[in-house]
Amino acid sequence: MHSYTPAEKRERNKLFRKGFRQALADCVDPALERRIERIDAAAAERGQRELNALYAVRETDRQAVANAKAAMRTAPRQDRASARQKVRDAEQQLRRSERAVNRAENS
């Protein structure tokens, strides 16, 4: 996963266009390629950190679902309805975090 900042996107696009014109003339500057690789490396590293953070959030949400289910199973009869609602809320949050992880992994 890559996570480019807006400035990096602009710079990379500008360098790519410049490199494309140089490729047409068959004289690509190696410094240009190094700058693009440096931008890509920074974006990849940032993307990996963001993906690791999403994994941590997903694990926290999974644990919250497990805790809510355990609380529901041990709740007294009059508190079961609110405990069930807490389980539903925790599962909904887990689905949101799983979708975010899936989007990040597939982009």
Image: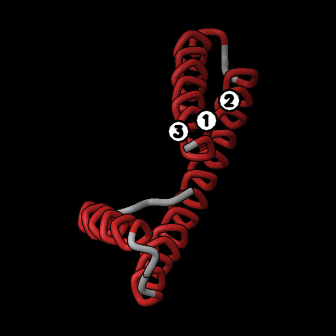
Choose top left, top right, bottom left or bottom right for residue 68.
top right
**Image location (x, y in percent) of residue 75:** 67, 22
Q: Is residue 48 left or right of residue 27?
A: right
Please give the label number shown on residue 71: 2
Q: Is residue 40 left or right of residue 9?
A: right
Q: Residue at x 42, y 86 (%)?
A: 29
Q: Name the kind of residue labelled 1 in the image.
A: Glu
SS category of the residue bearing label 1? helix
Instruction: Assess whether mark 3 and mark 1 are in contact (beta carbons under 8 angstroms).
Output: yes
| Residue where numbered disc 3 is placed | 100
Choose top left, top right, bottom left or bottom right for residue 90.
top right
Q: Name the kind of residue labelled 2 in the image.
A: Ala
Q: Nearer the viewer, residue 68 or 12?
A: 12
Please give the label number shown on residue 6: none
How far apart marks 3 and 2 lie (CA) works out to 27 Å
SS category of the residue bearing label 2? helix
Q: Nearer the viewer, residue 53 or 31?
A: 31
Q: Residue at x 71, y 26 (%)?
A: 69
Q: Which mark lies nearer to you, 3 or 2?
A: 3
How far apart marks 1 and 3 lie (CA) works out to 5 Å
Q: How is the image coloured?
A: secondary structure
**Image location (x, y in percent) of residue 6:** 26, 60
